[in-house]
């Protein structure tokens, strides 16, 4: 079981690192699109609904595809006032319980509901309601179940990592 957990951790680390590195390049794209938008708006007095929508689509992708990466690197939002003063095993227990009770069910709900949400959007050929907006809104909506699937993959890794911490003493707990 320990070997299986370490293998899963290693595989999920690889997947999340790859996706996180690709998502990080979206920040460059977002900066370029925003610069273009600002230049067009303030120098040429021209604006585009499609450019504005591209900005929030890219931002949504950064958030959705980067959340698992942030969790993997422990860069997610946490109140560290008490947590940072706790022992590694108490932290592992807290991480394990909160991941099992809140994060994983939340991911599962958003994946299952997100698939229905995307299916309905695709069936309706949903596009932007704004004149000049982007077509195929279902494409950006498809990132919702994808992002939360990545987050669930990482949440399972967090569960395994914390179980290893709680069950092993004096051994390395992270997969190499």
Image: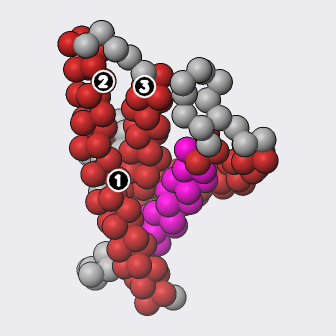
Q: Nearer the viewer, residue 89 or 104?
A: 104
> How far across and down, in percent of the image, does residue 153 sit?
51, 65
Q: Nearer the viewer, mark 1 or mark 2?
A: 2
Question: Left or right of 151: which side holds 66?
Answer: left
* Residue holding disc 2: 37
Q: Nearer the viewer, residue 121 or 49?
A: 49
Cβ–Cβ under 8 Å for marks 3 and 1 = no
* Residue holding disc 3: 52
Question: How busy is the neighbourhood of tag 2: few (under 14 within 10 Å), some, or many (20 plus)?
Answer: some
Q: Which label sits on residue 43?
A: none
x 38%, y 50%: residue: 66
| Total labels drawn | 3
* Residue holding disc 1: 23
Among the two numbered marks 2 and 3 on one chain, the one whose residue lies closer to the N terminus: 2
Magenta segment includes 67:
no
Label 1 sits on a secondary structure element that is helix
Magenta segment includes 141:
yes
Q: Nearer the viewer, mark 3 or mark 1?
A: 3
Question: Left or right of 69: which side holds 44?
Answer: left
Residue 36 against residue 164 in the figure, above or below: above
Cβ–Cβ under 8 Å for marks 2 and 3 = yes
Q: State how far apart marks 3 and 1 are (Cα).
A: 19 Å
Label 3 sits on a secondary structure element that is helix
Q: State how far apart marks 2 and 3 are (Cα).
A: 8 Å
Q: State how far apart marks 1 and 2 are (Cα).
A: 21 Å
Residue 53, can we see it?
yes
Q: Main secondary structure of the magenta part?
A: helix
Question: How busy is the neighbourhood of tag 3: few (under 14 within 10 Å), some, or many (20 plus)?
Answer: some
Residue 81, can we see it?
no
Residue 39 against residue 160 in the figure, above or below: above
Q: Which residues are magenta?
A: 140-160
x 60%, y 38%: residue: 135
């Amino acid at each position: 079981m320990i070997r299986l957990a370490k293998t899963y951790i290693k595989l999920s680390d690889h997947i999340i690192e790859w996706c996180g590195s690709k998502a990080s390049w979206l920040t460059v794209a977002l900066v370029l699109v925003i610069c273009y938008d600002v230049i067009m708006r303030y120098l040429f007095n021209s604006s585009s609904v499609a450019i504005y929508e591209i900005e929030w689509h890219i931002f949504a992708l950064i958030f959705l595809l980067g959340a698992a990466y942030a969790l993997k690197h422990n860069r997610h939002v946490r109140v560290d006032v008490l947590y940072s003063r706790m022992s590694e095993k108490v932290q592992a227990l807290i991480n394990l319980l909160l991941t099992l009770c809140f994060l994983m069910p939340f991911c599962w709900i958003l994946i299952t509901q997100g698939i229905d949400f995307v299916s309905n959007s695709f069936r309706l050929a949903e596009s932007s309601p704004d004149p000049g907006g982007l077509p195929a809104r279902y494409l950006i909506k498809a990132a919702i179940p994808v992002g939360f699937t990545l987050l669930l993959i990482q949440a399972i890794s967090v569960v395994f990592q914390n179980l290893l911490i709680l069950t092993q003493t004096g051994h390395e707990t992270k997969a190499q």
